[in-house]
Amino acid sequence: MLAAVLASVDDDKAEDIVQIDLRGRSDVADYMVICSGRSTRQVAAISEKLADRIKQEFRLTPKMEGKETGDWVLIDTGDVIVHVFRPEVREFYQLEKMWLPGSAHRGEMGDIE
């Protein structure tokens, strides 16, 4: 699932992609992915295409919040929580700082099972 999420957001030109390993730290999900879109339109497009890809590849319907505003969209795929932000909103909330210590991999999309 993580590899599909990372590929989808990368294909849609998301910026500053960060993956955070939550295993053993949270019961909510195994991974969190945080990325940015340059505009509300791009944030919405990244989110919609990701949801469509998850539906097609995994036969799951992810939960999505915030698509109407396009400032911050949260997509819950079950194993992976994805946050797609406009850069200004991402900077304001600084979500990475809550989860970062030793577990964030900015831009690394190597071999992921």
Image (cartoon, rainbow, N blue to C red):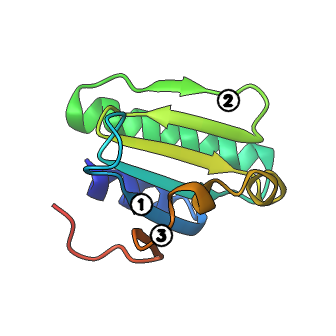
| Image-based side of 86 in relation to 110, left or right | right
| Image-based side of 104 in relation to 73, left or right | left
Which residue is under mark 3? Answer: 101
Which circle, 2 or 1, is nearer the viewer?
1
Which residue is under mark 2? Answer: 67
Which circle, 2 or 3, is nearer the viewer?
3
Identified at 59% across, 60% down, the residue is: 96
* Residue 33 image offset from top left, x and y in percent: 46, 54
Which of pointers 2 and 3 lies earlier in the amino acid sequence? Answer: 2
Residue ranking furthest to the left: 113
- Is label 1 in a helix, a strand or a loop? strand
- Is label 2 in a helix, a strand or a loop? loop
Which of pointers 3 and 1 lies earlier in the amino acid sequence? Answer: 1
Seen in the picture, residue 53 relative to 66 is either above or below; the reply is below
- Is label 3 in a helix, a strand or a loop? loop
* Residue 20 image offset from top left, x and y in percent: 41, 60
Q: Could you give the CA–CA distance between mark 2 and mark 3, rounded to whole angstroms?
A: 29 Å
Which of pointers 2 and 1 lies earlier in the amino acid sequence? Answer: 1
